[in-house]
Amino acid sequence: MTVHERNISAPIDPVKLERLAEVAIRVGLNLQPGQDLLLTAPAVALPLVRKIAEHAYRAGAGLVTPILSDEAVTLSRYRFGADDGFDRAAGWLYEGMAKAFAANTARLAIVGENPMLLAGQDPAKVARASKANSIAYQPALEKIVNFDVNWNLIAYPNPSWAKQAFPGEEDDVAVAKLAEAIFAASRVDNDDAVAAWQKHNATLRSRTEWLTAQRFSALHYSGPGTALTVGLADGHEWVGGASVAKNGIICNPNIPTEEVFTTPHARRVSGHVVSSKPLSYQGSLIDGIAVRFEEGRIVEAKASRGEEVLNKVLDTDEGARRLGEVALVPHSSPISKSGLLFLNTLFDENAASHIALGQCYSKCFVGGDKLTPEQVAAQGGNKSFIHIDWMIGSDQTDVDGIHADGRRVPVFRKGEWA
């Protein structure tokens, strides 16, 4: 019997799992009475899916529609699928999702995939499938990155993920440890998780208000292997924690979250930077990333592991070699202090400052909800089929804010707020 087939929900604290479902609905989505919910999740996360559905309906949800994925089915495609099938994706599904979001359906995704699921598969097929999926997903992705509706990401301790995060442990022990790490990072390890999130959101809001008021024209990063200047988009606005979607609902898109972030200028990035943590992407691990930017575009890219996958990702489209997000996270964040490498971007990006290749968020502009895509692009926002975060911060990273007149203001020193 494999780890996938066993019932190992026992090591997962049912009280904290219940709190996570409640936080997802009340804080993450702030689901409104009568609002529909589209939920995607790994099949193994069904215990959490059921609790979320219960809390959603208690909150007055109209219709909860779950869509489940399965690792064994995914691997079957790579082992037995026809070659030309890797250039296709379920566009009909994503078109339906886009229609749902246009009708004010909330979006919730439970993550927890095995970060190494596709590590042994043909990198060319992985890249082709990823590109086809990214293109097909665009109609739905645009509704999310433009923040048309309230959406949220949370995580479930998938056994295959737990074994990667805690190698050498027995299955039940690994799941229990990952579950506790998820609960702690998601702030559901205390009796009043909703109140804990209200306090945390207030702290993040104070950071975003200060940064937006500074009106920096650029950020400069310095540290081992890094000397990077990231120009910021014209009219940018810093965001973090709870935000207002275009449908008027205040939600927390990511649980957990420790970041404050904004939109860089797609044509004003220069210098070089190295990653500080591995990037788990589409079942492959990319480590030791080192890139060089000229006029906003990556002109040189290397990696100690997964370089072929990285370069194929960068060739997805013109915008894949430019930045769509820049985020600040202190080295002392709870996820960083845990010392755990989650091998999952939702968590690892909240352990270190990071940048994202690809699509920008229109909400990171003053009055962004009223800007057209053409206006976003004119102010420096990037467009791409992808949006991939990777970590560049550490306890040796300094960040300066640069004003238009050249004045510099310390923002981070040795990985902490200055």
Image: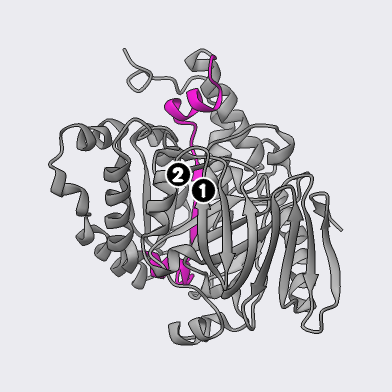
* Figure quadrant of the N terminus: top left
- Residue 114 in view: yes
Q: Rate crowding at label 1 as few (under 14), some (14 to 19) or many (20 or more) other CA atoms within 10 Å.
A: some
Find the magenta span and give its range: 141-168
The x and y percentages for residue 239 are: 65, 67
Q: Are marks 2 and 1 in contact (CB under 8 Å)?
A: yes
Disc 2 is placed on an element classified as helix
Q: Is residue 147 magenta?
A: yes
Q: Quadrant of the C terminus?
A: bottom right
**Eyeballing the image, is 279 above or below 312?**
above
Q: Secondary structure at mark 1?
A: strand
Q: Residue at x 71, y 51 (%)?
A: 195
When the figure is inspected, residue 217 is found, relative to residue 345, above or below; the finding is below
The x and y percentages for residue 361 are 52, 70
- Which residue position holds label 2? 307
Residue bearing the label numbered 1: 302
Kind of residue indicated by mark 2: Glu
Side of 113 where 346 appears, left or right: right
Instruction: Name the amino acid type tagged 1.
Output: Lys
Q: Is residue 97 above or below residue 119?
A: below
